[in-house]
Amino acid sequence: MDFTICDPPKNTIVFLQSTIIGEVSKLYDRSIWTIRHCIRNIEKGRPATTARDSDFAQLHNLARHIIHTCEVLGVAVDTITELIEESKLDARGSCKCINPTAAALQKRCPHKRISFWLKILQNFRGRAESLNARLSNEINLGFNVVVQRDSKATVEISQATRSDSASMKTIAVVTLALLPATFVSTVFSMSFFTLSVDDNTGEHEWLVSERFWIYWVITIPLTAITLLCWMYGQHMEEIRFLSALKSRKSKA
């Protein structure tokens, strides 16, 4: 080798850098294709998302790896670009590792190989960004499918509740219509009222017990106590709800 033309130490370092960059680029290629296969499997299984829940934790974990890959590729591209700019060109824009007048040696310039791998890494970065966009689309699709399914379930529950509400309304109307008659029949069937026959005239007489007041003395306080207990239960339920709401706000 003509030592007047080429600086062996620097030339050797550049060739070593070119070899390392090439091997690292191959690793990046395998890594990106591995991620691509994972995303493609998710896309191929898309029809099944209507029958099962998407594993959003796994999808976000895969997205984390893609974001990290995009970051690493971006740093690698910037680093190699700076490496070429710092060591490849002199003031005239010619390669400094070999004699620029030697056409045969120009073809073997290691910076050309480094530039080639730089283009490859730039393409890898574009592919990683595309994979990131595809995965984001799948995550959004899975989320929308789940939301749509839950919305349909909510509508079905609402329709069933409306049907039950109509049934309960019918029962309440029937009960309200029969309640006065039931109350009257219950009151007059008590032993406080007696239908007797006058032995002299043979006429029927309706007799009311003098102790009919006992019924009202017991019924009115009992009804009031029942209503007070119901109001107290509603008040305590409201207090528990407000306490739980304040607790959630304080934790948030």
Image: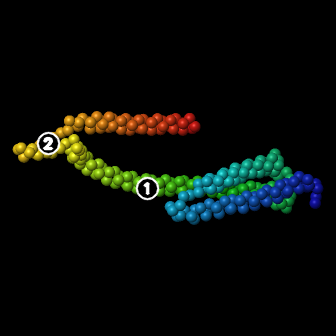
Residue shown at the point (37%, 52%) measured from the top left: 161
- Distance from disc 1 to disc 2, alpha carbons, whole Å, reads 64 Å
Residue shown at the point (42%, 38%) measured from the top left: 233
Residue where numbered disc 2 is placed:
206
Residue type at tag 2: Trp
197 vs 98, nearest the viewer: 197
First in residue order: circle 1 vs circle 2: 1
- Mark 2 element type: strand
Q: In which quadrant of the rendered view does residue 5 lie?
A: bottom right
Residue 203, percent across and down? 7, 45
Quarter of the image that includes the N terminus: bottom right
Q: Which mark is residue 152?
A: 1
Rendered position, 236 above or below 37: above
Q: Which mark is residue 13?
A: none
Residue shown at the point (15%, 45%) measured from the top left: 195
Residue 33, percent across and down? 68, 62
- Mark 1 element type: helix
Residue 245, percent across and down? 50, 37
Quarter of the image that includes the C terminus: top right
Q: In which quadrant of the rendered view does residue 127 lie?
A: bottom right
The type of colouring in the image is: rainbow
Residue type at tag 1: Lys
